[in-house]
């Protein structure tokens, strides 16, 4: 029952964030809503027993691909509505209130009430999946060939992306 | 223990949302984000099937999908930057120079 409730909670988070990402007018809001979807899916991976994949999802999707998308956004035109002072002050006020609440809670001693030793040891309850995945990657006749191909594809994509997006300097003008 | 059917239904829902976003957007960055959403839902489906079978192979596929997604995002964003530099717009409907 509790596991189903947790599933529904994070499935709802993923779906609602996906809806916001697809139907919000501002692309920046969409990118941050996609963050919620990716984190929700990462938690569902964890609930399905794939701890290694959940960590990879957070590292590569949230830490890599989403940051890359935000970089792309920052290099393209800004939304005029984002620059209104009222919106900036609202953002500052919300962040400041959150920081103030955090500081007062830190100071009130609520953190010392729960000693860490009484928490259950979550690391040893389920068997970790990193070991079988790592063995399957490097075993002959298993996934070794695909693993090596993946590394070549990544290298080609990186070199290609740098080649496409580089600034072209005019060398032929100097030679003439 | 979550029923496998629930996970497949959620994956189908997310994939449908990704297709909907892909078809209705014209901004190139939004297209890229819709594709990421679809890849993610496929990962979820793979993982649910892997848990059902008790097999590690189903858990390997999402890692390769992750590699493809990272390569796609890198090349796609390089193309977006070039597109913006040449056309000062991200509307994919404006890209017609390769049409006959």
Image (spheres, coloured by chain):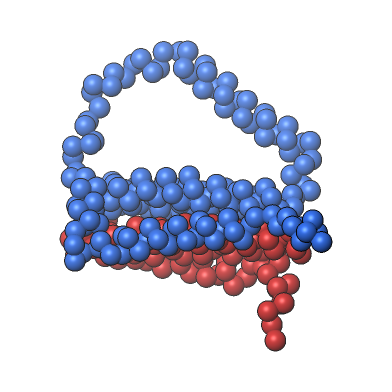
Give residue B29's position: percent from left, percent from top.
Answer: 62, 60
The chain letter of the red chain reads B
Q: Nearer the viewer, residue B80 or B43?
A: B80
Residue at image x 61%, y 61%?
A: A164
Quarter location, residue A150: bottom left
Residue at image x 68%, y 79%?
A: B98
B48 left or right, relative to A173: left
The relative height of residue A65 versus residue B10 in the rendered view (above or below) is above
Residue at image x 45%, y 57%?
A: A155
Label count reads 0
Residue at image x 63%, y 31%?
A: A94
* Residue at far front of view: A175
The relative height of residue A108 versus residue B56 in the rendered view (above or below) is above
Give residue B2's position: percent from left, percent from top.
Answer: 27, 56
The chain letter of the blue chain reads A
Give residue A158's position: percent from left, percent from top.
Answer: 51, 56
Quarter location, residue B89: bottom right
Give residue A96's position: percent from left, percent from top.
Answer: 63, 25
Whether residue B4 is visible, yes or no, is no
């Amino acid at each position: 029952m509790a596991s189903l409730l947790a599933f529904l909670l994070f499935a709802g988070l993923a779906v609602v964030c996906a809806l916001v990402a697809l139907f919000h007018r501002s692309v920046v809001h969409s990118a941050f809503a996609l963050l919620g979807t990716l984190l929700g899916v990462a938690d569902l991976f964890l609930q399905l027993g794939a701890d290694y994949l959940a960590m990879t999802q957070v590292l590569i999707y949230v830490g890599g691909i989403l940051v890359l998308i935000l970089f792309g956004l920052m290099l393209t035109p800004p939304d005029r509505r984002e620059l209104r002072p009222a919106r900036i002050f609202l953002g500052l006020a919300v962040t400041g209130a959150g920081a103030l609440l955090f500081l007062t809670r830190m100071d009130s001693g609520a953190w010392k009430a729960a000693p860490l030793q009484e928490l259950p040891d979550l690391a040893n309850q389920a068997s970790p999946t990193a070991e079988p995945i790592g063995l399957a990657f490097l075993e002959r006749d298993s996934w070794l060939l695909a693993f090596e191909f993946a590394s070549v594809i990544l290298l080609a994509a990186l070199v290609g992306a740098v080649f496409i997006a580089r600034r072209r300097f005019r060398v032929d003008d100097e030679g003439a | 223990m979550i029923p496998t059917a629930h996970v497949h239904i959620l994956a189908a829902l997310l994939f449908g949302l990704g297709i909907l976003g892909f078809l209705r957007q014209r901004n190139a960055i939004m297209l890229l984000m819709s594709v990421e959403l679809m890849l993610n839902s496929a990962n979820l489906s793979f993982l649910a099937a892997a848990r059902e079978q008790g097999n590690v192979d189903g858990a390997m596929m999402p890692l390769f999908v992750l590699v493809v997604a990272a390569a796609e995002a890198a090349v796609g964003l390089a193309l977006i930057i070039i597109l913006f530099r040449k056309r000062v717009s991200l509307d994919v409907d404006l890209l017609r120079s390769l049409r006959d």
